[in-house]
């Protein structure tokens, strides 16, 4: 994504211009890791979200702590945070980053047909932390799926996307 003078870069389809150069390809079109060694270390934060559609009866079992594999959301939160910390091991061209914070939140709308997952990740580094936030959401959703698949065969994971990324000289107060 192109750099912006605005410290908050909202993510939209317009940011993906047709003429943009893919930074993970060299002049010959071969995959490469981007060299960020000359970039300054800045405070960076990314927020991603996604959802898993499931039945209200599955939610009832989760809320009543009646799932055979244990506390679903607590386990999904731990799995998502662990995945964010290991993103560089999972995504081939992603820099291994020592993230300084990752938080995962779950929300169940009144329709009781889904769980919305939001993850934020923070770091002070020369590169962004959006892949870590996206990975946290993805693995949290997969963990919910794994822990509930015996009672709900119709679950669907989807709508995983980056909501925002920010960068600044120093963290906000």
Image (spheres, helix red, strand yellow):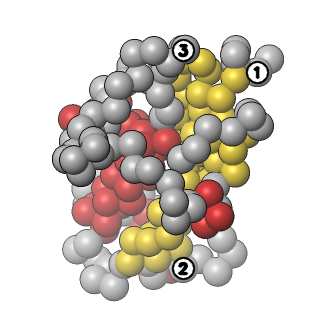
Which residue corresponds to the image point at 30% horizontal and 26% vertical from the top-left?
A: 96
Examine the rendered structure and indicate whether residue 126 appears above or below residue 13. Answer: above
Q: Is residue 43 visible?
A: yes
Q: Position of residue 86 (x, y in %)?
A: 28, 33
Q: For residue 113, which numbered disc appears in the image?
A: 2
Which residue corresponds to the image point at 69% horizontal and 44% vertical from the top-left?
A: 9
- Residue situated in front as seen by the camera: 82 or 26: 26
Q: Is residue 78 visible?
A: no
Q: Position of residue 155 (x, y in %)?
A: 36, 78
User: Taking 107 as reference, is 74 left or right?
Assistant: left
If you read the primary sequence from the N terminus, does the residue marked by circle 1 or circle 2 appear first?
2
Which residue was labeled with disc 3? 41
Which residue corresponds to the image point at 69% horizontal and 39% vertical from the top-left?
A: 4
Q: Position of residue 119 (x, y in %)?
A: 53, 45
Residue 13, quarter of picture: bottom right
Which residue was labeled with disc 1? 172
- Residue situated in front as seen by the camera: 56 or 172: 172
Examine the rendered structure and indicate whether residue 60 appears above or below residue 144. Answer: below
C-alpha gap between disc 2 and disc 3: 42 Å
Q: For residue 57, which numbered disc appears in the image?
A: none
Label 2 neighbour load within 10 Å: few <14, some 14-19, many 20+: some
C-alpha gap between disc 1 and disc 3: 15 Å
Which mark is nearer the camera, 1 or 2?
1
Q: Which residue is farthest front? A: 27
C-alpha gap between disc 1 and disc 2: 36 Å
**CB-based contact (under 8 Å), mark 1 and mark 2:** no
- Residue situated in front as seen by the camera: 117 or 58: 117
If you read the primary sequence from the N terminus, does the residue marked by circle 1 or circle 3 appear first?
3
Label 3 neighbour load within 10 Å: few <14, some 14-19, many 20+: some
Residue 52, quarter of picture: bottom left
Which residue corresponds to the image point at 33% horizontal and 85% vertical from the top-left?
A: 154
If you read the primary sequence from the N terminus, does the residue marked by circle 2 or circle 3 appear first?
3
């Amino acid at each position: 994504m192109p750099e912006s003078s605005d410290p908050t870069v909202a993510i939209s389809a317009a940011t993906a211009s047709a003429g943009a150069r893919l930074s993970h390809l060299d002049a010959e079109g071969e995959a490469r890791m981007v060299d960020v060694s000359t970039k300054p270390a800045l405070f960076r934060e990314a927020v991603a979200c996604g959802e898993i559609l499931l039945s209200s009866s599955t939610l009832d079992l989760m809320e009543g702590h009646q799932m055979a594999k244990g506390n679903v959301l607590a386990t999904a939160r731990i799995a998502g945070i662990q995945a964010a910390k290991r993103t560089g091991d999972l995504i081939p061209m992603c820099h291994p980053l020592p993230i300084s914070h990752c938080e995962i939140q779950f929300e169940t709308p009144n329709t009781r047909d889904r769980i919305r997952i939001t993850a934020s990740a923070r770091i002070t580094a020369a590169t962004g932390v959006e892949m870590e936030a996206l990975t946290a959401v993805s693995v949290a959703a997969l963990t919910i799926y794994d822990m509930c698949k015996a009672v709900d065969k119709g679950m669907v994971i989807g709508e995983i996307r980056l909501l925002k990324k920010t960068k600044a000289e120093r963290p906000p107060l």
